[in-house]
Image (spheres, rainbow, N blue to C red):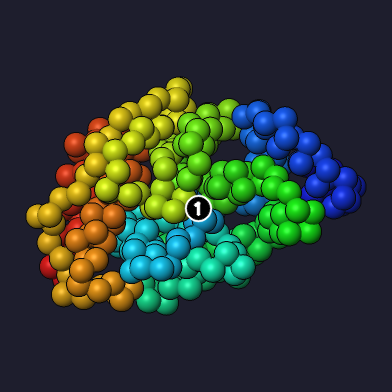
């Protein structure tokens, strides 16, 4: 990967290698090596929370709104520096975080230095993949150019361009929550804890309606935890949702926001009860504004 990023290897050669790796089932070490190659080219931006947003959400219903964006903004308003990053997969027809940034008051960064400035000012920023790792965005497009998928979709979720000490990873396919956690452990960041789960439509947004095993990578180990579904009908609701969520979806929205915050706070506290209680408190304060 270093050779490709340095311009010593062409697209065809790199694409062939990645496709062979995918056919043979990529190892955690291979993914971690690719991630480190990209990370060596991005400065530490001083974020607390790394929030990748690459899957997008199906938009056939109101639940297609990026409620994780609201969760991230609430955390930022309470002292956490949150760097969200992702890209717009327009052919997918999905709703991506980038579309709704203005609704929540999150700025889009032009480059890593701009993202750092926004983080210092607002506590939250969105950095498009093309603005910090354009080669990775090119590689994602190879699925259309060459007709085959590569491991790059796994790689981009782990890039952590902000240098966050906490992170969350949403995925869709079975086995990938464990894979993402194990990759983080192999990367070996000694101050980084990551929670990994099956997200809403594969996005880094927790689905409160399902019971599932979540995985956490901390500096010394990878652990799994079974979480029962977390729908709570007693959560307060705001008078309106800045993302345009209709009344019939407001309870689901509230639970999704609270549980997404719970996930990232669990990576910090390693105590689900404490994390959930803090998330509920932050949500109450948000609704009372």
Is 151 on the left-hand or right-hand side of 109?
A: right
Q: Which quadrant is home to the N terminus?
A: top right
Query: Helix or strand or loop: what does disc 1 sit on?
Result: strand
The residue identified by callout 1 is 52
Q: Position of residue 15 (x, y in %)?
A: 80, 47
Is 115 on the left-hand or right-hand side of 79?
A: right
Residue at 52 percent across and 56 percent down: it is 55
Quadrant hosting residue 73: bottom left
Quadrant hosting residue 273: top left
Is 17 on the left-hand or right-hand side of 216?
A: right
- Picture layout, residue 110 above or below residue 188: below
Q: Position of residue 35 (x, y in %)?
A: 65, 41
- Picture layout, residue 27 above or below residue 258: above
Can residue 155 be seen? yes
Dot 1: few (<14), some (14–19), or many (≥20) neighbours within 10 Å? many
Quadrant hosting residue 266: top left
């Amino acid at each position: 990967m270093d050779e490709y990023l340095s311009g010593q290897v062409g697209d065809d050669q790199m694409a062939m290698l990645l496709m062979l790796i995918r056919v043979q089932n990529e190892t955690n070490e291979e993914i971690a090596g690719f991630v480190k190659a990209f990370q060596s080219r991005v400065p530490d931006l001083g974020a607390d929370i790394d929030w990748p947003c690459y899957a997008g959400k199906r938009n056939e219903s109101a639940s297609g709104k990026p409620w994780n964006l609201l969760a991230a903004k609430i955390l930022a308003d309470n002292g956490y520096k949150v760097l969200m990053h992702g890209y717009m997969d327009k052919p997918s027809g999905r709703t991506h975080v980038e579309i709704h940034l203005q609704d929540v008051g999150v700025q889009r960064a032009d480059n890593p230095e701009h993202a750092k400035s926004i983080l210092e000012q607002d506590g939250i920023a969105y950095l498009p993949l093309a603005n910090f790792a354009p080669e990775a965005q090119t590689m994602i497009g190879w699925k259309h150019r060459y007709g085959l998928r590569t491991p790059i979709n796994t790689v981009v979720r782990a890039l952590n361009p902000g240098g966050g000490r906490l992170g969350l990873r949403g995925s869709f396919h079975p086995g990938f929550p464990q894979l993402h956690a194990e990759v983080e452990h192999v990367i070996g960041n000694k101050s980084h804890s990551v929670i990994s789960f099956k997200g809403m439509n594969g996005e880094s947004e927790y689905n409160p309606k399902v019971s599932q095993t979540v995985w956490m990578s901390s500096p010394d180990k990878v652990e799994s935890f079974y979480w029962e579904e977390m729908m709570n009908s007693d959560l307060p609701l705001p008078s309106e949702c800045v993302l345009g969520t209709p009344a019939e979806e407001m309870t689901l929205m509230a639970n999704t926001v609270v549980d997404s915050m719970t996930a990232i706070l669990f990576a910090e506290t390693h105590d689900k009860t404490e994390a959930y209680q803090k998330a509920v408190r932050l949500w109450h304060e948000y609704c009372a504004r």
